[in-house]
Amino acid sequence: MSARTARWVAGWIAAGSVALIAGSLLLAYLDRQLLSPAMTTWDFSDVLNGLSVLAIPVIGFVLASRRPGNRIGWLFLAAGLASGVNGFSRSYGLRALLAAPGSLPAGRAAMWLSSWTIGVPIGAFAFLLLLFPTGQLRSPRWRLAAWFVGGVFALWVVAVLVGATRVWSHPFSGSVTRALPPPVVTALAVLGPAALVTSVAAVVVRFVRSVGEERLQLKWFAAAAVVAVVAFITSVMTSSVIANVLNSLAFLCLYAAIAIAVLKYRLYEIDIVISKAVLYGSLAVFITAVYAALVAGIGTLVGNRHSVLLAALAAAVVAVAFQPVRQWAGSDFARRIGGTYAAGDVLPQMAHIVAAGTGAERVVVWLRVGDELRPGASSDGGPPATPLPVTGHELPTLPEADLNVPVVSQGELLGAISVTMPRDEPLRPAGRQLVTDAASQAGLVLANAGLIEDLRASRQRLITAQDEARRRLERNLHDGAQQDLVALSIKAQLADVTIDEDPAQAKQLLGEIKADAAGALENLRDLARGIYPPLLADLGLAVALNAQAAKSPLPVTVEADAIGRFGQDTEAAVYFCCLEALQNTAKYAHATQARVCLQAQNGSLRFTVSDDGTGYDARHVPMGSGLRNMADRLAALGGRLEVRSAPAHGTTITGHLPSL
């Protein structure tokens, strides 16, 4: 079954189940005055049970639509549909036969159906315990236990079906088990709890032998499963109101344990997919539970479940409490989307979330890194798009997208979400709102991801720059000092050979050796200045830059009046940044002059390198490797680099370093 077909089937089953459960509650409400207290299903325990049952098809739809190959979701859907049929058929039969006799057809058939369908969700629950969370038995050795559980509940359903058929004409004469032979009743009373205990043993053993993330997923579920089974057996044996209420609460705890496994411990990796459903579903359950608790619960205690005062009180409580509950649920959603996944999983998960919520063919989450907008992840895993240049904080036009939503934080463009819909399937307003909501809450996520990408890119650039510096140093040593020393060695050997035979030639060679040694020494000094100039260490920035300006192929003016001394790292960063800027000016700017200005204020240092060259459009041309290296060098010390250039207006490079 394809994912689309599975989602469609699961959706229809879940919708039908919810409709049946809601219909049973509606009929119970309409018949609350027409039935005796012993027959009505509109009391606190029944309403609470109906609300708890609503969670079954919802969970089933989420799991089956997202993981159709896992049996867990389909077990939930089967249990939800059977529970809906059971509850609706009972409410229908009560109305057709007792509350309003003759108003509806097939009342006895409805009561017959309600008598035996209750065994289906109980059996599904038993198999849920056997298979959770993988949808498979833990090992082949558990097949015998699975056959035992399946056989017991098949026998239970068949026996109750026979009993319901025997009391077809008198559906209210008592429990259908009274129509069964006593040995069968005794067998069911023993085998039913034994099957449930076997299922509980399966989940407990799986938990004890689990490790890592699976153990965290099973921890709460195993505890809740034990409580649910004990509460269910107790409610069946006693049939008291308190036992029924505790049974419903126990199953709500079980559903909460599944939610913890999914939301907190990333079971099936669909936690953020259902976050919106959790948000609005929790609000709906909250409103209904408050109303039911006040009207049905308190009303039952005081003997008046139809009080207008109680209904008004319930509405007031819901109105006052709705906003804080909504804010709590919304903030919890924002916290999860910001911190649930590891850094490497955030962007792919965001793309899958938006695609699942909108039905998009392709969703791309873009991340801003420097002056580029890069595709961080896509929902279909297709080939990445081409990075796009960014001007300021304006979102560029993204290719082949039906909707582009920027992700902005404090006026700064951090990235974008682009959505491409299938052909002939436009994006609905609800889908647009979902993308907008995701973008509004993704600022922190993309900011963190952007910082990580910036750090990774800067590290790569630093490594590349270090490797290039080593290669340049090796090249300079090989082509400079090494050649000088080789020439000195050859001439020294010639002088040694000719010193006795031709003293004049030997004397000439010694003079050349002396000159070559002086040249080699000067080359080594130039090489040392390139690594870290002695003038910078001894006399400071102004003297070192003036010395380099004197060697520049174009006139360079250095303005550095009384800037004083700074830390070694600060002076080195400014010195090499200025040299890089002057080298770029000499190579590419076609300038006639350049200017270096150093300014110190309140312990901070600012330098500017400007020229009167041809310039370029800095808004649309990304930084080259030299400028990137300068920016990384300054950023390592908490500084920043600014580049201003325009065609025919020269280039100005400004660096800022804070006080250190």
Image (tube, rainbow, N blue to C red):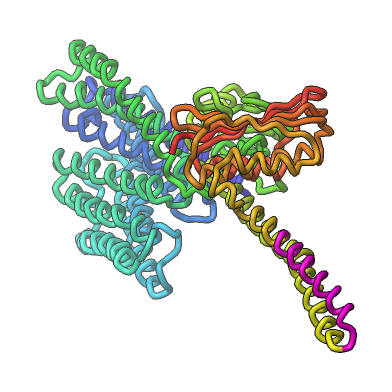
Q: Is residue 109 left or right of residue 582?
A: left
Viewer-side residue, 190 vs 460? 460
Q: For the stretch drawn in magenta, what is the main secondary structure?
A: helix
Q: Is residue 273 left or right of residue 224?
A: right
Residue 333 inside the magenta-drawn segment:
no
At 81% across and 85% down in the image, what residue appears? Answer: 496
Q: In this view of the protein, can residue 348 be seen by the observer? A: no
At 45% across and 38% down in the image, what residue appears? Answer: 337
Q: Position of residue 221 (x, y in %)?
A: 31, 53
Q: Residue furthest front?
A: 504
The C terminus: image quadrant:
top left
Viewer-side residue, 544 vs 118? 544
Asked which quadrant contains residue 24, the reply is top left
Residue 511 inside the magenta-drawn segment:
yes
Q: Position of residue 127 (x, y in %)?
A: 38, 58
Stretch in magenta: 501-522
Asked which quadrant contains residue 433, the reply is top right
Q: Is residue 465 left or right of residue 583?
A: left
Is residue 343 shown above or below 358? below
At 25% across and 31% down in the image, what residue appears? Answer: 41
Asked which quadrant contains residue 240, the reply is top left
